[in-house]
């Protein structure tokens, strides 16, 4: 049965949204095309009508997830510019974020997969990372632009690194301690 262009566009959007969540939860190699399509409520056979390969879907899913992440940060800035930086850090370095990678930071959940793939996913990560650095830099207190950029890079790298470490240890107390230690360093009283 042939679907309309509008329905095909909605199906593609649903596939990308589901893939962005599942790639963050399970990793690129942790989910196959058939299961991705099943989770999107579609049949496996329709996949190649939308994407040339699973890797092409991964690239688009990365872009989608990175854009959503930036939208969330920008919403915090729009809501309360003075409190945005602490809100971003506090929200990021939580056990809730650690335990729900499917809705969390693409860099912490998919960065390693993107780095191992062909260069196709890297431009999306590069662009989003530059935008995240710029946003964080704009929220940092007074100082020379170069120093604020360095601090923005260090802040984001510490957040991502803390999340990766917190997810890979099997000791709940240590995992929470990692998140709290980095939060304390980034948000001194």
Image (cartoon, grey):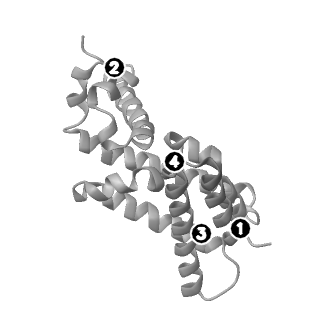
Horizontal arrangement in the rendering, residue 104 relative to residue 125 (left or right): right
Q: CA distance from mark 1 to mark 3?
A: 17 Å
Task: Provide the residue designation for mark 4.
Answer: 68
Question: In the shown orientation, is residue 147 left or right of residue 110?
Answer: right
Graded by Cα atoms within 10 Å as few (under 14), some (14 to 19) or many (20 or more), the crowding at tag 2 reads some
Q: Which mark is first along the chain, 3 or 4?
A: 4
Residue at 29% across, 17% down: 3
**Sequence order check, earlier mark of 2 and 3:** 2
Neighbours of disc 3 within 10 Å: few (<14), some (14-19), many (20+):
many
The label number, if any, that marks residue 184 in the structure image: 1
Above/below status of 89 relative to 172: below
Q: Position of residue 58 (x, y in %)?
A: 31, 44
Looking at the image, is mark 1 or mark 2 earlier in the sequence?
2
Q: Quarter of the image holding residue 35?
A: top left
Residue 117 position, x and y percent, is: 25, 54
Residue at image position (40%, 50%) is 110
C-alpha separation, residue under disc 4 versus residue under disc 3: 16 Å
For mark 2, what is the residue? 42
Q: Which residue is mark 3?
A: 136
State the SS at label 4.
helix
* 148 lies left or right of 40: right
The N terminus - image quarter: top left
How would you rate the neighbour count of disc 4 (Cα within 10 Å): few for under 14, some for 14-19, many for 20 or more? Answer: some
Q: Residue at x 31, y 48 (%)?
A: 59
């Amino acid at each position: 049965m042939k679907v309309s262009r509008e329905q095909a566009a909605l199906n593609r959007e649903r596939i990308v949204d589901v893939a962005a969540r599942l790639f963050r939860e399970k990793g690129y190699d942790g989910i196959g095309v058939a299961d991705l399509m099943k989770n999107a409520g579609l049949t496996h056979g329709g996949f190649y009508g939308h994407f040339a390969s699973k890797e092409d879907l991964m690239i688009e899913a990365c872009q989608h997830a990175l854009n959503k992440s930036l939208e969330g940060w920008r919403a915090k800035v729009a809501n309360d510019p003075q409190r945005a930086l602490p809100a971003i850090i506090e929200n990021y370095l939580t056990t809730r974020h650690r335990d729900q990678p499917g809705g969390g930071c693409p860099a912490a959940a998919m960065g390693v997969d993107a780095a191992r793939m062909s260069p196709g996913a890297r431009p999306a990560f590069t662009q989003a990372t530059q935008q995240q650095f710029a946003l964080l830099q704009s929220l940092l207190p007074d100082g020379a632009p170069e120093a604020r950029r360095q601090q923005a890079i260090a802040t984001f790298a510490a957040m991502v690194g803390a999340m990766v470490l917190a997810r890979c240890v099997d000791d709940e107390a240590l995992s929470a301690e990692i998140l709290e230690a980095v939060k304390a360093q980034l948000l001194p009283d």
